[in-house]
Image (spheres, rainbow, N blue to C red):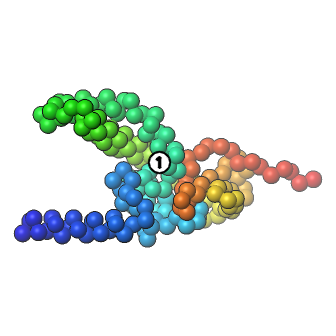
Amino acid sequence: MRPLYSLAVGLVLAAAAAGQDVAPRFGVLHNPDLYKQDTPQEALAAALGAIDRERYDYLVAHLLDPDWVDGRIAANRGYFDRVAGEQIVATAAGAALRGPELDARVREVSTRLNYQRLTADVRRKLADEPDNVKDLRRFARDGQFQVAGDTATATLKDVKDRALYFKKVNNRWFVENRKDEAVAPPPKE
């Protein structure tokens, strides 16, 4: 009975993955029905929904700027490659691996550990600085969104020194992790 159940679950998951237009990222399936990204406003709402559901894994994998995420992963790759290598060769199965098989396994474990750390860092940052989430909610509620091609900016009427930035990649909008100050309009004379 158990093998039949496992086969059924596997087929359902495979069918779900096959029906997606976006590949899983870091093992996290894309869910465009729950987390819409057709506009910058939807991307922000999706990010807030992921935070509310404590789906930081989804937030990092599918809603934050993929260039920023990939850059953070790349910056820490050396450390996590060493950690993964030590963990793998410490196991009997890992000690038997050689050459390309060992390299592939190290890269797989390294990426997973690195992604888990980044996800934990994002979770911790948002927990340690709850005003950031309040600000995101305010941008979602009161923000003025300006779209220019594949980039967008959200501003607040009464806040001239901050903005929220978005970028469009492959028809999906992502929240950028930028601290750049918004360009304040020139004073009216």
* Residue occupying the far right of the picture: 189
Residue 124, can we see it? Answer: no
Q: In the rendered structure, which amino acid carries the disc numbered 1? A: Leu
| Nearer-the-camera pick, 124 or 2 | 2
User: Looking at the image, which residue is at 64% across and 55% down?
Assistant: 151
How many circles with numbers are drawn on the protein? Answer: 1
Residue 149, can we see it? Answer: yes
Where residue 8 sits in the image (x, y, percent)? Answer: 18, 70
| Nearer-the-camera pick, 138 or 57 | 57
| Nearer-the-camera pick, 131 or 145 | 145
**Quadrant assignment for the N terminus:** bottom left
User: Looking at the image, which residue is at 15% across and 33% down?
Assistant: 96
Q: Which picture quadrant has residue 93?
A: top left
Q: Is residue 161 left or right of residue 95?
A: right
Q: Is residue 185 above or below residue 49?
A: above
Q: Is residue 110 left or right of residue 175?
A: left
| Nearer-the-camera pick, 64 or 154 | 64
Q: Residues within 10 Å of mark 1 (few under 14, many from 20)?
A: some
Q: Which residue is mark 1?
A: 126
Label 1, secondary structure: give it: helix
User: Looking at the image, which residue is at 15% across and 64% down?
Assistant: 6
Q: Is residue 4 above or below residue 116?
A: below
Where residue 101 sits in the image (x, y, percent)? Answer: 24, 38
* Residue occupying the far front of the picture: 100
Where residue 83 sits in the image (x, y, percent)? Answer: 29, 31
* Residue occupying the far left of the picture: 1
Where residue 187 sits in the image (x, y, percent)? Answer: 86, 51
